Amino acid sequence: MAGRASVQADKKSFTLPQVPKIAIYLVGFIPAVWLFYAGVTDQLGADPMRYLEQGLGLWALRFLIATLTITPLRQLFSINLLRYRRALGLLAFYYAALHLTTYLVLDQGLDVAAIVADIVKRPYITIGMATFIILVPLAVTSNNAAIRRMGGQAWAKLHRLVYVAAIGAALHFLLVVKSWPPEPLVYAAIVAVLLGYRLLRSMVKKTSPRRRPA
Amino acid sequence: AAPLSATKSPFSTDEKKTSREDVTSYNNYYEFGTGKEDPAAKAGSLKNSPWTVKVDGMVGKPAEFAIEDLIKSSALEERIYRMRCVEGWSMVIPWVGFPLADLVKRVEPLGSAKYVAFETAYRPEEMPGVQSMFPVLDWPYVEGLRLDEAMNPLAILAVGLYGETLPNQNGAPIRLVVPWKYGFKGIKSITRISFVDKQPETSWNKQAPSEYGFYANVNPSVDHPRWSQATERRIGEGGLFVKRRPTLMFNGYAEQVASLYAGMDLRKLY
């Protein structure tokens, strides 16, 4: 199935020094450990709960974006980081889970009525919850056994949900702020570029006269 | 910051004050950036002296006050007020200021004057947030009150906090404090006060009319379209494990201000 172009790309692709995958997790969890440590030792400013909640959410979005850069890096710049994508995706999920837990426990104090009202009435919470729910099956199937069981095609199809999750996460951020401050707009723009690239590429491939029958 | 002497006021709350550190480091002042830490980091560039406040419009005695004269000629009081931000957090702040009504009386409004319009300084070279590629608000920041709201004894022009002149991030050298309204009504670094006959435009109302009304009275039963206003987090209380507390009607000042809104549908006139 692989086209000529991508075969050539693979030949040229750099061999970056291989880092053990566990290192991605160790480094990836540094922001979370720091945020919790700084929060408990009162170093997060006047509103530590909010800082922690937003910080964890922001890192979830950053890791989600990181997973989306793997494919364009390979296709455009022949940089192959595919072996780290699972770790980055799982880090996005873990951060999203910590962000959600902070909201449920520290922000809302497990006030079920308030939480249900938030989910039903507030689009940014609805979108945030939906985004987290989308990430769950992706996290659960992020292992070789699941890929074998599901078959590569079905697995890949399921994992395209990450595009929906990225849109959800960017929207969630945009809707929680007042006015249109730059930071959520920048993240939304990055997500738009990464997804727009895929859309454009799939359109070019479909209409390309050089396409060979499979 | 220079010390200011002030008398105590019966309008002060005896609730625990938010620390000076938190009051002066956690601010919304978008002219200096949208981050809570931006004003403390960047507002130093605002030249708050010399400073004049122009009072004009439908008044018998329009005037231009130098800030030091205004402070000298006013009876300063300490007013310890609750402050509820529209974002769902609150503080208790010991302001130093004088009743807005005192200034209103000095300029003798005409019978035709129904509203008071306020304007913040607009100085792109001193305000990095105003130069932003993404303008978050239509500058300069403007606010307004109905004349009877402005005459309410709770409404003050603050020139200090914690017994000293205002830090720039809190709106130096002079700002509005209307404790029964959401914090964004408390316009900072005022340069102009105009008496008008029509409801003036207000910055956040222009930015998102469905989310921020002209009145912006603290009201736990009228939610912001995107979040609940039923509860609030008191800054500096409990750290990471802060508990939400119920938000009070008119931020707990119903006794003094509820009569201003008798017969009004506060769901529509939010």
Image: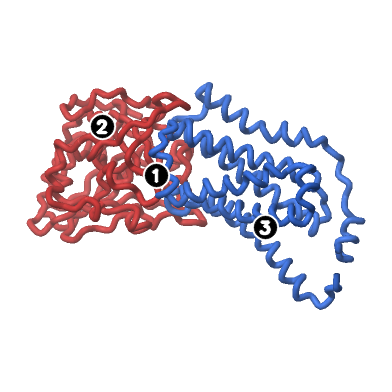
Q: Is B62 situated left or right of A2 in this image? A: left
Tell me the subunit letter for badge 2: B
- What is the number of the mark on residue A117? 1
Going by the image, does A107 lie left or right of B224? right
Say which residue label 2 marks: B81
Chain B colour in the picture: red
Q: Mark 1 touching mark 2, by CB under 8 A?
A: no
Is label 1 in a helix, a strand or a loop?
A: helix
Check disc 3 and report its element: helix, strand or loop: helix
Q: CA distance from mark 1 to mark 2?
A: 30 Å
Rounded to the nearest angstrom, the CA distance separating label 3 from label 1 is 34 Å
Q: Is residue B234 above or below residue A180?
A: above
Residue B199 in sight from this viewpoint: yes
Say which colour chain A has. blue
**What residue sits 39% from the left and 46% below the top?**
B227
Residue for point 40% across, 55% down: B137
Q: Which residue is mark 3?
A: A194
Mark 3 crowd level (few <14, some 14–19, many ≥20, 10 Å Cα): some
Marks 3, 1: nearer the viewer? 1
Name the chain under label 3. Answer: A
Query: Which amino acid, mark 1?
Result: Ala
In the picture shown, does residue A147 fall above or below B72? below
- Residue A191, image x and y in percent? 62, 55
Q: Which residue is located at x 82 percent, y 51 percent?
A: A79
Q: Residues within 10 Å of mark 1 (few under 14, many from 20)?
A: few
Residue type, mark 2 in image: Tyr
Residue B103 placement: quadrant: top left
